[in-house]
Amino acid sequence: MNHEPVIEARSATKIYQSTGLSVRAVDQVTISVTAGEFVGLVGPSGSGKTTLLAMLATLLRTTDGNLLIDGQDLGAMTDGQRTMFRREKIGFTFQANNLVPYLTALENVELMLRLNKRNGSLSRGRAKELLTRLGLGDRLGSLPSQLSGGQQQRVAIARSLIHDPSVVLADEPTANLDTERANQVVSIFAELVHEEKRAGIMVTHDLRMCRYVDKVIQMVDGRIERVVTKRADIDLLAGTSGFDRLDRQRSGQVPNHSLHAGLTRPLPISAFVGAD
Ligand code: ADP
Ligand code: MG
């Protein structure tokens, strides 16, 4: 097995600057994820999870430190190079699923391939297969508006995997799903990461979903608070919600939406088609 990291953050730091205010959203984060490893990223609201994911997805630049994917330093790339790199190597789904409203489920998934100029019957077959595996075999021709939130989220997951990326990033992919569907989606997601040897990071508020991951990374105030790698410890977390209590305590159970402006708003479609 290859233990070279696919994803590597070395003291990665992001400071947001806005009028007289500077927020250290990600603070000297060092992590690594190998091929075939599925990581759960957890932590209270505002702890920097989305920011870290957006930086790894090449949608945001670091203020300091380095991010490497497949050994390539993201900070050293021009915007154009980052766009090409993203299209080829990275699959992501954010909370706002950014499906194109006038394309069907199948077309939304195929869109990623067309951007990479990898269209064709083979890809269509793969798109159908992925959607079917995610329980949407009978909804291939539906528009996003004809799908439930959870179904849209599953289309977004299929889209994030279709171009065979080495890195898959998902920000709260189960936020709109009921427990049964969440379990189904995350277990399939985990299978697809494991089988196809991708490096996966999933942000989740639902510690029960950690039963499907190989490693749990907890962030607090922009920093890595702890990394849980032992299977028994992960299963304990997933079963007893140890962090959950901590999470509720620290966040006061009130999601601070105003603080999330900028990243929880839907990303522009240019994020996917790469007009950055
Ligand atoms: P999480 O995903 O863990 O909830 P975020 O990465 O969204 O955390 O946010 C981390 C911190 O950065 C928070 O304090 C948040 O308010 C701040 N933040 C996020 N996006 C922006 C932005 N675009 N401009 C300024 N501050 C931001
Ligand atoms: Mg977030």
Image (spheres, grey):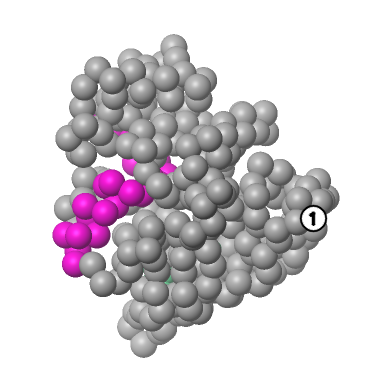
Let me know if residue 149 is in the magenta part: no
Residue at the spot 21% in from the left edge and 27% down from the top edge = 119
Provide the residue span drawn in magenta: 78-102
Res. 268 visible in picture: no
View extreme (top): residue: 138
Relative to residue 208, is residue 203 drawn left or right? left
Q: Which residue is nearer to you in this view: 225 or 120?
A: 120
The answer to whether 230 is drawn above or below residue 131 in the figure is below
Q: Quadrant of residue 110?
A: top left
Residue type at numbered disc 1: Asp
Q: Which residue is mark 1?
A: 233
SS type, badge 1: helix
Classify 10 Å Cα crowding around label 1: few (below 14), some (14-19), many (20 and above).
Answer: few
Residue 128 percent coordinates (x, y): 38, 19
Residue 63 percent coordinates (x, y): 36, 79
Residue 160 percent coordinates (x, y): 39, 39
Residue at the spot 34% in from the left edge and 41% down from the top edge = 98
Res. 196 visible in picture: yes
Residue 208 percent coordinates (x, y): 72, 44
The answer to whether 207 is drawn above or below residue 262 in the figure is above
View extreme (bottom): residue: 20
